[in-house]
Image (tube, rainbow, N blue to C red):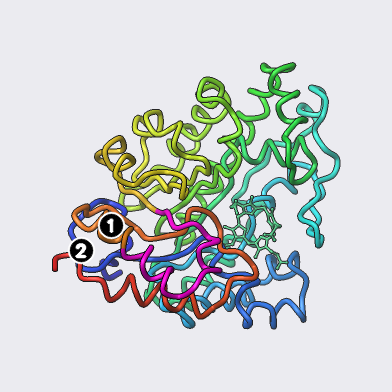
């Protein structure tokens, strides 16, 4: 495999051009994706290796991003635990929700090499179709984020149920998080064996916890996942939304890259996370602004990080479904034409 700038940047190694990809880059803002979705449901799409490969490639072919991300969803590995996940207009719903300590015991432990074989087959198909033009990122949800969906039974605005669960039943919460960490670690390990060149763990909701409780209910389980899947030459990325209060704790974590949101000051993040690569951090809503603003903000981020070998351009969270594609084009073009050493 040729040395890609994305992999070099993830390991903090010298490279010429700042690499860029965006979270949720294969999705509804892309007309080609919407055309595929007119014919198949999201659930079917996630089970069809040929279509997974097609939509994974779409943003690479359309915009020239420097990395591809597996087309799948963080909630799929919850299904073999005995949970029905359905994707509806208003967001996903999970049934039955985990509300009681005894519900935790009812969840099945399983071998992802067996029960997630369809995703692993998808990875092998994507790798064939990518032909090493760009590296492939595999992923899964961080244990605490997966637990929020399990306990809330879907998305949430207030996170009351998950907080009630962890504060009233801390031991059972730890049992649940331990089960999720074991499955997630094995799942990422299998993804790497199937061909993933890097892996990203999405801790979308860990930031609802105080740093004190983050240290108890999220961080140790992320550590377990990263320990299980640690593989020479394969960078491990942690994405955490609401990143700033946790930076000092993340600096201690054994992983190569931390992906930060737009509320996080990059100069401060580079100082605190010294020795790690950083990914981020444009506000996804900025892509709804005028093209000139997109260019100016991208340049500000590029100039701030130009001297650091370990920087990967991304958004602070996933790209939104209504995003104008013209601004995505401007963003990639701005990043690719920037001279780091000028
Ligand atoms: O980044 C990529 O392009 C790869 C694919 C990917 C999807 N979901 C596809 C998807 C990835 C990496 C995810 C991760 C994911 N899924 C997260 C973590 C990252 C984040 O955004 O915080 C979370 C929390 C989920 C759970 C999830 N899946 C929600 C809340 C929703 C509904 C809301 C929404 O944005 O649609 C989904 C559905 C989903 N996952 C879609 C896609 C493309 C939309 C499905 C459709 O086509 O209708």
Q: Is residue 287 magenta?
A: yes
Q: Secondary structure at mark 1?
A: helix
**Which quarter of the rendering shows the N terminus?**
bottom left
Q: Give whichever of 190, 214 is nearer the camera.
A: 214
Above or below: residue 112 compared with residue 319? above
Determine the image quadrant of residue 19. Answer: bottom left
**Which quarter of the rendering shows the C terminus?**
bottom left
- Say left or right for 128 vs 333: right
Point out residue 298 in the picture as x, y percentages from the top left corner. 36, 64
Q: Secondary structure at mark 2?
A: loop
Which secondary structure class fits the magenta region best?
Answer: helix
Residue located at (24% from left, 51% from top): 12
Residue located at (50% from left, 35% from top): 222
Point out residue 228 in the picture as x, y percentages from the top left corner. 46, 38
Q: Give whichever of 338, 77 is nearer the camera.
A: 338
Residue beneath disc 1: 9
Please tell me how crowded label 1 is: few (under 14), some (14-19), or many (20+) other residues with Cα within 10 Å: many
Determine the image quadrant of residue 81. Answer: top right
Residue located at (26% from left, 66% from top): 3
Residues shaded magenta: 280-299
Residue beneath disc 2: 15
Residue located at (39% from left, 34% from top): 247
- Say left or right for 290 vs 103: left
Task: State the mark number for residue 172.
Answer: none
Q: Are marks 2 and 1 in contact (CB under 8 Å)?
A: yes
Earlier residue among tags 2 and 1: 1
Point out residue 128 in the picture as x, y percentages from the top left corner. 47, 76
Q: Give whichever of 39, 233 is nearer the camera.
A: 39
- Residue at mark 1: C-beta within 8 A of ligand 1: no
């Amino acid at each position: 495999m040729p040395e890609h700038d994305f992999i070099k940047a993830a390991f903090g190694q010298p490279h010429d051009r700042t690499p860029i990809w965006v979270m949720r880059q294969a999705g509804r803002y892309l007309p080609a994706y919407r055309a595929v979705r007119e014919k198949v449901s999201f659930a079917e799409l996630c089970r069809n290796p040929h279509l997974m490969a097609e939509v994974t490639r779409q943003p690479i072919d359309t915009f020239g991003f420097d990395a591809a991300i597996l087309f799948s969803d963080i909630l799929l590995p919850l299904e073999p635990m005995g949970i029905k996940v359905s994707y509806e207009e208003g967001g996903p719903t999970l049934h039955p929700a985990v509300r009681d300590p005894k519900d935790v015991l009812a969840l099945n432990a399983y071998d992802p090499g067996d029960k997630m074989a369809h995703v692993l087959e998808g990875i092998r198909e994507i790798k064939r179709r990518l032909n090493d033009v760009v590296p492939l990122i595999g992923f899964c949800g961080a244990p605490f984020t997966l637990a929020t969906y399990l306990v809330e039974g879907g998305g949430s605005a207030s996170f009351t149920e998950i907080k009630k669960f962890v504060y009233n039943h801390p031991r059972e919460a730890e049992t649940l998080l331990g089960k999720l960490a074991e499955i997630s670690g094995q799942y990422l390990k299998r993804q790497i064996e199937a061909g993933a060149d890097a892996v990203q763990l999405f801790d979308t909701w860990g930031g609802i916890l105080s740093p004190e409780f983050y240290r108890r209910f999220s961080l140790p389980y992320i550590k377990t996942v990263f320990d299980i899947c640690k593989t020479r030459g394969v960078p491990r990325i942690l994405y955490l939304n609401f990143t700033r209060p946790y930076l000092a704790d993340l600096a201690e974590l054994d992983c190569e890259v931390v992906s930060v949101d737009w509320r996080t000051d990059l100069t401060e993040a580079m100082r605190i996370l010294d020795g790690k690569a950083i990914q981020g951090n444009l506000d996804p809503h900025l892509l709804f602004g005028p093209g000139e603003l997109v260019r100016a903000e991208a340049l500000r981020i590029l100039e701030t990080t130009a001297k650091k070998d370990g920087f990967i351009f991304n958004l602070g969270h996933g790209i939104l479904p209504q995003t104008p594609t013209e601004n995505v084009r401007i963003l990639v073009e701005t990043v690719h034409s920037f001279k780091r050493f000028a």
